[in-house]
Every structure is written in structure tokens, then in C-alpha cells.
Image: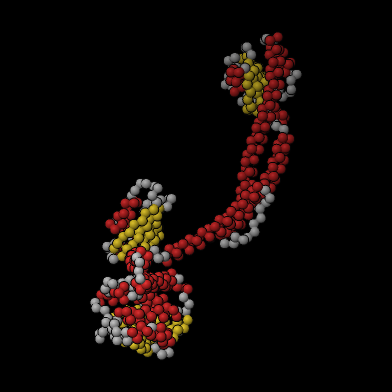
Amino acid sequence: MKTNYKQKLFLCFVVIFALFTVGIVFLEQTREKEYKTSALEDKLDNYADIVNVMLEKHPNNLSMIDSLVQLFPSNFRLTLIDRQGNVFYDNKISDIKKMENHSGRAEIIAARKTGKGSDIRVSASNEKKYLYYAKQFTLYYVRVALPYDIQVRQILKPDNLFLYYILALFIVILLIINAVASRFGLSIRSLRDFAKAAEQGNLHTQIHFPQDELGEIGAEIIENYRNLKESKKEIDLEREKLLQHVLISEEGLCFFSSDKTVEFYNGLFIQYLNIIIDEANSNPAVIFTDPAFVKVISFLSRSEKQENYFETQINKQGKTFAVRLNRFDDRSFEITLNDITKKEATRRMKQEMTGNITHELRTPVTGIRGCLETILEHPLDPEKKQYFIERAYNQVLALSEIIQDMGLLTGMEEAPQSFKLESVSISELLENLRKDLEIQLQEKNIRMEWNTENVIVRGNHNLLYSIFRNLTDNVIRHAGANVNIFVNKYNEDKDFYYFSYSDTGRGISGEQHLNRLFERFYRVSEGRTRDTGGSGLGLSIVKNAISFHKGTIVAKNKPDGGLEFLFNLPKR
């Protein structure tokens, strides 16, 4: 049967106090017996002195000894022994010649050494048990004895009152120990009950503790445990969120311990790693041996502990990867691989665009400045002055068009939510466009035709208008005179209408230019845009507006001459 904490504690205290009590009782009984024995020996010592006095007064008169013995207790035994151990008198033995030499008796040996000695044993002469006491004098030993019978044992028996007192005290202390053990056991049982409840996940179980320090400690332990469990639950939840974030992250992540042991990584890290290294490998630790990561290896081998961050780039297989290493306080670290090919291309494009914008703005600004300087610094007749004013005005219009087109492109890229969607009739839009450009179309004898009856597109009206407006402006500026424009809906599916926008103009010589027509400020021939007007952003606006509507566009030369654009727009 398994004992509980209370029983163990009670048994432990009982054993300790029992051993202590037994020791006290044994010591007291022994000391009391020694005290009573010493008192009896003192009495026998007096008897021996009386006998010695009698012998000194009557040295060879043993009859006087017999008379003296009559005065002593009836069971009193007196033995006189010379210094050689021979008995020359014994009041209980008539034939002393038969008695053995007593020099080897325990009490005689003790008397020879210390002057007196005692012993309890059975007599060899009459086979009775005696308490012997011997005392050494000048010429002999006087040995007196009393039978070790009930009377003597009763005299030497310790008093039991102290024993009864000790036993009563022992019982009282046992009751106190039981109460204390019960109180301790209650706290332990409460902790045990809570441990079982915690194991079963029932942390809301009410546990009651006694109103003492141990109870306060137990209650504090339970409260701390509950807080710890709640904190652990929150940490596990956050860890799960972090792991999910790492797994679905658009960056390749891998965590390493301080000794470069792989701890965790996501699939994208392996994917990027196998693009960079020469041979396929599923172990992220290959990063520490592959030559492509020599800069990372060199950084990790440095001894400067204050360096905890390192970043570099690796170009491999036509792609650019950003490699970042972040070292933590415990010397573990993470390595991040990120495909920045598109980002680098965008960065280069923005650099080129900035250069192009600067280049494009310089021409009209320089023209405006030149015209104004001419007007301000030179006396001009009204006709000349009007000429330079008109030139400056035309340059301002060109500058305004560039700024307006750049604003439209920026809005599509950075704030697409600002463009509201609605249902737009393509036929109505083209009819409005023809009216807006009627003068320019008539000047170059350009005719527009379309086959878009009942075609309703879901999109932003202004952006859809800008698509067809910029394509038509492109024809007016570059296709030449006597040109026909055809807008045809040539196909459709459940999501999109497919359009063809073509002309019968000059087209573009050199197919290498077709893929770059939609780049900002791209020119087939230098000076083309400046000579014919326009911002140089029209086709870029067309492509971005179609991309805004989830469509695509391509340009191609027609076999019989002219340029054709194929694109799709979403249905209602």
C-alpha cells in the first residue's frame, strides 16, 4: 500500500522522537541504577570499614568478627582474603580450606587496582548469586556481599515515574505531530490535486489551501503555473504564426545554430539555393562550402562579435539574389535569400526613366527659356515678338502634356484604387473620340471604322478613352496621310473581349523595335517624338491602362503595311 505524504511525515517524526525518547529513558534508567548501586556500595563500604576497625583492635581474634556479623543483616556475607588471594574467613562457608584462591575474582582485581571493586555473579562455593563488594586494606581484603535476590533487585530498580512522564509526553507530542503532518499533508494534497487537474488540462479547478505560509506558497505556485501555461500558450501561438509566416514568405529563410547546424528553413530557400549552386542539393548547410557564398563564409569566420549583419548580392543564371545574414545574441543566425531580379530591373528602369524625364523636360524648358530671353533682351517688332511667344506657348503645351502623362502613369501605378470602374460602351467611346480629333483626322485624311456594336466593357472611362486616344494620336503623328484605322472585336470568352486596332500607314521597319514600343520615352528613331509632337509616353500609358484592366497588349507589323495592336479588355 502506497503511503501518502502525511503518513511519511508522521512516521518520520515518530521514529525521530521515539529514538530520542528511548535514548533519554535509557540514559535516565542507567544513571538511576548507577546512583542506587553506588548508594548500596557505600553502605557495604561502611560494613567493610567496621570489620576493618574490629580486626585492627583484635588482630587475631576471629571470634570477635563472628560477634560483629551477628549485628549485620541476616543475609549478610563477610569474606576475609589475604593479599595472596587466600580466604581466611567466611561467615557462610564452614570449610574455608576447600575455597579456591580469590586473587582472580573481578572485585578483588578491581580493589587491587583502585582500592575497591564490585561484581554481581554466582558464588562458586554455595552457587548463590551475590552482589560482591571488596575493599583493600594493608594486610588483607575485606569482601562483603548481599544475595542478589528480589529485595536487592528492588532496591536497584529505577523509579518508573519518570518513564510514565516520558510516555505521556510522547503521546502528546504524537498528537501534535499528527496535527502538523495533517496540515502539511493538506497543502501537499492540494498541490497533488492541482497537478492532476493540470495534467488533464482542467486549470480552472478550485484548489483550497490552509491559511498559513505553506498555503500561501502553494497558492502562489498555482497562480504562477497558470500564468506560465497562459504565457506558453501565447508563445506557442506566436511561434505557430511565425512558422506559417516563414513557410509562406516570399523570401527564402533558413535558421542556423551557433555551430552552423540547420534548425529550420522554408521551401523557397531550397528553391533559390538550387538556382545558385551548381548541383542540386536539399541540405541548406551546403551554403558553407559552395564558392558562390564565399563572402558569407568569410563574414562568419571573422572574430569581431560586434558585426551582426551582412548583406551581399549573387548573380547566377541570369537572376540577381540578395543575401542577408543576421546574427543573434546567442551567436545563432539566419540567412535570407531573396530574388530581386525584377526589383533590380525596376530600379534600372526608374534610373533610365529619370534620365529620360530629365532629357525630355530639358528640351521644352530650354526652348521656353530661349524664347523668353530673346523677347526680354532684344528689341523686337510686334510680329517677331508674337512668333517667339507662340513658340514658347507650344513648348509649354508640350511640357504640360509630359507632366499630365507622367501624372496619369504614376496614378495607375501607385493609386489604382482612385480610378472608379463603370460600364463603358466602346462604340460610344470611339464616336466621342472621332469627334474630339475631327480636325486632326481631316487634316491628314484619316478615316476611322469600328466593329464594336453592343460591346460593353467594365472599366474606368478615362483610362479606356486614353487607350484609344493615344493609339489614334500615334497614327496621326507617325502613320502619314490617307490612312484608314480599323477597330475590330475579333473574339470573346466568358471574361474578356479581344480587340484589334490597326492602320494602313507606314508601320515600323525593324521588328526589334516592336517589343520596346511600350517603354517610356522609347523612340524608333532619335528625334521622332520631338519632330512630330507628343510626350513620348503615349504607348506606355496604353500598356499600363490595359494592365490596369487585367489585360495584355502586343504590337505587330501587318503584311500589307501598317501597324496592328492586339489587346483584351474585361467584360461587364
In-front residue for pair 149/31: 31
Percent from the top left, x then y, of residue 100?
59, 21
In the rendered image, residue 316, in percent from the top left (x then y), is placed at 29, 63
Task: Please state, as top left, top right, bottom left or bottom right, where the N terminus lies in the image.
Answer: bottom right
Q: In which quarter of the image is residue 278?
A: bottom left
Q: Position of residue 189 (x, y in %)?
A: 62, 54
426 up-or-down from 229: above or below: below
The residue furthest right is 71
The residue lying at 60 percent from left, 60 percent from top is 203
Q: Which quarter of the picture shows residue 244? A: bottom left
- Tell me how the rendering is colored: secondary structure
Look at 57% across and 59% down and name the residue there. Answer: 198
Q: Which of 331 and 367 is in front in this view?
A: 367
Q: Which residue is drawn at 68% across and 22% down?
A: 41
Residue at the spot 43% in from the left edge and 63% down from the top edge:
246
Q: Is residue 516 visible?
A: no
Instruction: Name the foreground residue: 306 vs 455.
Output: 455
Front-most of 261 and 123? 261
Q: How many discs mark residues in the rendered view?
A: 0
Q: Is residue 183 left or right of residue 296?
A: right
* Residue 236 on image: x %, y %: 50, 60
> Would you say residue 205 is visible in this rendering?
yes
| Viewport quadrant of the C terminus | bottom left
In this image, 420 relative to 168: left or right?
left
